Image (cartoon, rainbow, N blue to C red):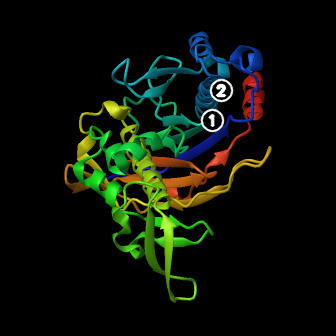
Amino acid sequence: MAISHTGKLTLWLIDTRSIWPGNNIKEAAPDALSLIPTQDRVDVQRKFQIADARMSLASALLKRFYISQTLQLPWSEVAIARRGDPKHGKPAALLPDGSFANIDFNVSHQGGLVTLIGWDPPEAVSAAEKASEPPILVGTDITLVNERDDYRTIDTDGIDGFIDIFSDVFSDAERWDMTYNVDYLTLLDGRIVPGTSIGRADRVVKRGQDVTIKFANDNGQGEEMTIDSELITEAKLRRFYAFFAYKEAYIKLAGEALLAPWLKELEFQNVRSPKPGSPARCSTAGLWGEKVSDVEIIFKGTKVNDTQMDLRAYDEAFMIASAVKGNASVKLEECQIEVLDVNSILQYARTH
C-alpha cells in the first residue's frame, strides 16, 4: 500500500498591478530590490516593461519568503538551485549544506499576478531533511484571456486556425474539443446558457455572424434568441485558456514546462472554464469567481489518479491552475489561495 503523505499546502497570490508605480523598477522599488540576490536583481532590472519587472521582483520575493518561513532559515541564507538539469530543472530550495530540502514549490506570473504553490512535510518529518525529490510535487499556472491580440488570428483564420497554432502542445482530440465544444455561454444580460443547449451553434468558429440559439429560460420555458457569434468564440477562447492552464500546471510538476517531449500524450477531458469573478475597482482587489476541480487527466491513454488539479477564476479574465502530484492526504479543493500584501513580505525580510 502506498504511503499517504500529509503535510501542508500553501497557495499564495500577489497582485502587482497597483504596486511600485512608475516606469523604472530601480526607482520604484529600491528597498525591495535590495532584499534579493544580485543575479535576481540584475534579471529584474533587465526587463524592458516595468509590468514584467514588477512580476519578476514579486516572484523572487515570494519564493524567498516561502523558503525562509518553511525551513526557518534567515532571509540571507535562502538559496535556490535547479533539480536535475542545471538549466531547465525545477527550482528548489537548498539547505545550508548545499543539499536539496524536502519541500516543493512552483510559481507563475501573468498579467500582473504572481502565484505560488508549495508543499512541505508534517512536523514529524523535517522539511530540512535532504531529498533528491520530495514525495509530493506541485505546479501552478496563470492564464489571462485576451491579453494578447488573439482575435487578429481568429478573425482571419477562425478559432480553429488559432487553436491549430498550438498543434505541438495539444493532441488532435484536445484541439477538436476546444474548437467545437462549448461549456457555457454568457449572454449580454448576464444569463448563463449551457453549451449543450445551443445545438449546432457550437460549430461557429468566427465572430460577426448572427446565430439563433434555443434554450430553456429561468422559468423552464423554451426561448429563442439571435446572438452575435462573438459570444461563442469568446466562450471557446476562455475554454482554450483553461486547457492551457491545466497543461502548463501539470508539466511544471516536474519542471519541464513546454519542453516536455510527451506534451501531446498528456490530455485533459471534461474541461470547464470557471465562471469569472468581478474586476478590481480602484484600489479594491479583484474578486474570486468559480472554482472547478472535476477535470480528468489522461496520460498515454491511461487515466491519471495520483494528481489533484483545480482551476480558479480571479477578476474578470484570470484563471489560476493548481496541481498536486503524489499520494497526498491534504486536499487541494479544501485550500484557499491567500492574497498577500507585498509590504508584509518586505517587513518579514527586514526582520528575519
Name the residue located 67 percent from the left edge and 39 percent from the top edge.
15
- Determine whether 169 is above or below 191 in the image: above
Along the horizontal axis of the image, is 346 left or right of 62? right
Can you identify the residue that label 2 sits on?
A: 54
Q: Amino acid at mark 1?
A: Gly
Between residue 87 and residue 183, name the one nearer to us: 183
Between residue 339 and residue 174, name the one nearer to us: 174
Name the residue located 42 percent from the left edge and 46 percent from the top edge.
155
Whether residue 331 is visible to the viewer of this picture, yes or no, is no
Task: Indicate which disc residue 112 carries.
Answer: 1
Q: Amino acid at mark 2?
A: Arg
Along the horizontal axis of the image, is 203 left or right of 100? left
Q: Secondary structure at mark 1?
A: loop
Give how far across and how far down residue 189 sits, in percent. 63, 69
Give how far across and how far down residue 70 sits, in percent. 59, 35
At label 1, counting other C-alpha atoms closer than 10 Å, the crowd grade (few under 14, some 14-19, many 20 or more) is some
Mark 2 or mark 1, which has the lower sequence index? 2
Q: Number of labelled discs?
A: 2
Name the residue located 53 percent from the left edge and 40 percent from the top edge.
118
Whether residue 340 is visible to the viewer of this picture, yes or no, is yes
Task: Indicate which disc residue 7 carries.
Answer: none
Between residue 167 and residue 141, name the one nearer to us: 167
The image quadrant that residue 191 belongs to is: bottom right
Quarter in which the N terminus is drawn: bottom left
Q: Secondary structure at mark 2?
A: helix
At label 2, counting other C-alpha atoms closer than 10 Å, the crowd grade (few under 14, some 14-19, many 20 or more) is many
Between residue 87 and residue 211, name the one nearer to us: 211
Are dots 2 and 1 in contact, CB under 8 Å?
yes
Q: CA distance from mark 2 to mark 1?
A: 8 Å
Give how far across and how far down residue 341 sits, in percent. 74, 38
- Determine whether 109 is above or below 88 in the image: below
